[in-house]
Image (cartoon, rainbow, N blue to C red):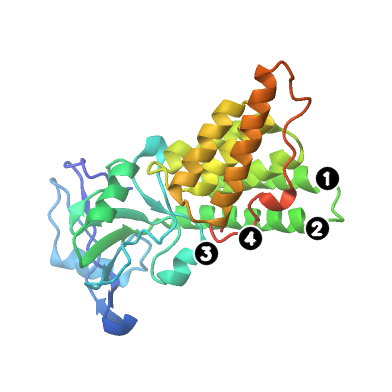
Amino acid sequence: MASDGDNSNKILYYVAGAAVILGAGGLLYYVFSDDKVATKNNNTKTTKTSTETAKKKKKTTNENLKFMVGEGSKSRFLDLNLCPGPNGHRCFVTSDVKNTEKYKKIKTGSQLVSINYEPVGNKKYAEILDLLENAEHPITAEFLQIPELEKKWNEAEQLKIQANEIYKDSKAEDRFAQAAELYGRAIEKHDGFRKEYYGNQVLMYFKTKNYQDALENTDKFAILDPQGSWQRGFYLRAMSLQHLKRYEEAVEAFRKAIDVEPTTSLAKKMEKYIKTCQDKLSQRVGGVEASSSVSMPSLSMPSLSMPAIN
């Protein structure tokens, strides 16, 4: 992967493929480009002969693909399911199948490398999301396709699908444990950067009463959701704390979840859960310790078919 700071031997990626412009009435217009990928080395000059030879070879090099959102469009590419790279830096397109349904040219594993021609390849994930949110229209977002990540992360999605099927199969032996194991493999295959996989595994831990493991999974949400906009993440954390009888922390987490989207049906349910936790705290103060963690109806937990999980 090319580094923005490597000046001694930099690979310059030019537009390849198509620009997609969203026009009035939501119509998409495709503008194709014939520009090729070129390399620049301080010790080597690019010649016409080498360029012509490169054109004849099968394209195996990573390519940049530019998408332009038309002025007035509501999209800021934030409807893409994105994730960070190691240490919360960079920004990548996850294996969520809805990504390619919305933007058919963008591939799983692609890295967002520039916003309105400003390089963002080595910025922190949170900073990149802020730039997307506040960028002037029309927005031009440039993505670097990474075939090896595309293959690996799409395999992770298949593991998640298998886990979902096992979870739904009431006849499967130890289905919750099996699903939890498959979600774990999907997490590993996606390099630990899909919050939805962690969330699915949390649900399986609830089913098997592994509440501490569930809570540890929710610790990952902070780096994967730096803007704190994923209501489901706060909800799962609150549920984990509640099952562990850490009621004060659970109340705080429920309130954070409600603040994200106060008008959802889930937010209304969480108001009731807060009351339950407060009642448990009152019993504790009065010298009556709860004998068990609060029992929550299974339907109150997010369904695996929720749009946020893909």
Q: Which residue is drawn at 76% across and 55% down?
A: 166
Q: How far apart are marks 4 and 1 (CA)?
A: 21 Å
Does label 3 or label 2 sit earlier along the sequence?
Answer: 3
Mark 4 or 3, which is nearer the eye? 4
Task: Specify the farthest residue to the front.
Answer: 286
Amino acid identity at mark 2: Asp
Residue sitting nearer the eye, 298 or 310 = 298
| Whether residue 26 is situated above or below residue 130 in the rendered picture | below
Q: Could you say whether the residue bearing mark 2 is in a helix, strand or loop?
A: loop
Q: Name the residue under label 4.
A: 305
Q: Which residue is drawn at 72% across and 33% down?
A: 210
Q: How far apart are marks 3 and 2 (CA)?
A: 23 Å
Does label 4 or label 1 sit earlier along the sequence?
Answer: 1
Residue 75: horizontal and vertical position, in percent?
Answer: 33, 66
Q: Distance between the residues labelled 4 and 3?
A: 13 Å
Q: Name the residue under label 3.
A: 97
Q: Name the residue under label 2.
A: 169
Pointers 4 and 1 in contact (C-beta within 8 Å) = no
Q: Residue at x 66, y 36 (%)?
A: 276
Q: Mark 1 points at which residue?
A: 174
Does label 4 or label 3 sit earlier along the sequence?
Answer: 3
Q: To which quarter of the image does residue 47 belong?
A: bottom left
Q: Residue at x 40, y 43 (%)?
A: 85
Mark 4 or 1, which is nearer the eye? 4
Q: How far apart are marks 1 and 2 (CA)?
A: 10 Å
Amino acid identity at mark 3: Val
